[in-house]
Image (spheres, rainbow, N blue to C red):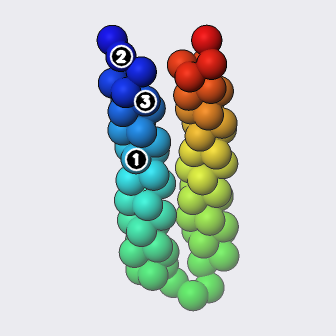
Amino acid sequence: MSLGHKLTIVLVAFVAILVTVICVAFRERRLGKSLAADDIHGQQASDGRVLAVIFSAILGGMVLTLLAAWIVFL
């Protein structure tokens, strides 16, 4: 497999992570609007789910960066 094909796979993985984060964030935002204004625990749980997805995506991006560096330099 050529370098271009390997980097294309990394790019596709990055876009997949990005799309997942955007979809989950918008889904939680839509569901969060349906919560009652006085439901603080529900709002905090929704915020926690969004933050968990965002931070796990950050870790995934770091792994993809290491993978891209490994592919290019080794």
Label 1 vs 2, first from the N-terminus: 2
- Quarter of the picture containing the N terminus is top left
Q: Nearer the viewer, residue 27 or 12?
A: 12
The residue under label 1 is 15
Q: Position of residue 15 (x, y in %)?
A: 40, 47
30 w.r.t. 58: above or below: below
- Asked whether disc 2 touches disc 3, contact meaning CB atoms under 8 Å apart, the reply is no
Q: Nearer the viewer, mark 3 or mark 1?
A: 3
The residue under label 2 is 2
Q: Secondary structure at mark 2?
A: loop
Q: Nearer the viewer, residue 31 or 25?
A: 25
The crowding category of the residue bearing disc 2, from other C-alpha atoms within 10 Å (few below 14, some 14 to 19, many at least 20), is few
Q: Secondary structure at mark 3?
A: helix
Label 2 vs 3, first from the N-terminus: 2
Q: Nearer the viewer, residue 45 or 15?
A: 15
- Residue 23 relative to residue 59: left or right: left
Residue at x-position 38% and y-position 43%:
16
